Image: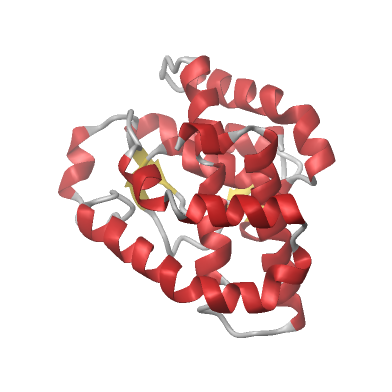
Amino acid sequence: AVAAVEELAKLHAPRWDDPTLNDLDWLGGRSTPEDIAAVVGLWAMFLPSFLETYTHHLDAPQLDMLNAFGERIEGWMNGRNGPKTVTHGDYRLDNLLFGDGTAAPRVTAVDWQTPGHGSPVVDLSYFCGAGLVPEERRTHDRALVRSYVSALGIGGVDADEAWVWEQYRRETFAGVVMAVIASQVVGESERSEAMFAAMATRHLQHAIDLDSLALT
């Protein structure tokens, strides 16, 4: 996990708060009014079918969190602020290859279908939220955020750790949105249901553990 977040900082740091990224039309994730309206519409469209399949995977607090967040999704997206950079958009274990750092890089990220220009901490919270089982993630949340901030510093970015931590808490919901929407637009299989169930339960638990709703 440390290797993964340090590699993520190597992606984010070189173009941190770079205004010239606005000129790259092919980068998505900018949270324009049109983007926000699209996500809100997709959430409303897909939530019923998501619940039909995944409700039995969720415990009562997770289901309550899902419903409470759904009422605030537009405000949550509108409330994003701070520096932007190049983002991966789907930085999770299925898309990471791990090596020994000599014959192969420590981490290689694949699946570059969703590169964006947005909040860097979305990638960080998304990876940690589902990449670690909740018991381990609770233990290492703070240390992983600290490792990320330190790696940004090596890349020349002086990020405020308190701000990164607040955004990390707030962006637990990015994984929730991905779990709800993406689960309804891919082919159904036993493996896909297991994967999206893990994503949904872990991201919702992340939000519960960090009281993320208070920041929406």
Query: What is the total number of numbered labels drawn onto the structure image?
Result: 0
Q: Position of residue 4 (x, y in %)?
A: 64, 40
93 on left or right of 185: right
Is 170 above or below relative to 110? above
Name which residue lies at 68% across and 78% down: 53
Q: Position of residue 139 (x, y in %)?
A: 80, 29
Name which residue lies at 54% across and 75% down: 48
16 on left or right of 66: left
Report the quarter where the C terminus lies. Answer: top left
Q: Position of residue 108 (x, y in %)?
A: 60, 50
Name which residue lies at 67% across and 67% down: 196
135 on left or right of 68: right
26 on left or right of 14: left
Report the quarter where the N terminus lies. Answer: top right
* The furthest residue to the right: 135
Q: Position of residue 9 (x, y in %)?
A: 51, 32
Front-most of residues 65 and 135: 65
- Identify the image quadrant of residue 78: top left
Is 146 above or below relative to 131? above
What colour scheme governs how the chains and residues are painted in the rendered image of this protein?
secondary structure
Front-most of residues 143 and 95: 143
Is 195 above or below relative to 177? below
Name which residue lies at 76% across and 37% down: 137
Specify whether residue 165 is in view: yes
Front-most of residues 114 and 211: 211
Front-most of residues 87 and 129: 129
Specify whether residue 105 is in view: no
- Identify the image quadrant of residue 81: top left
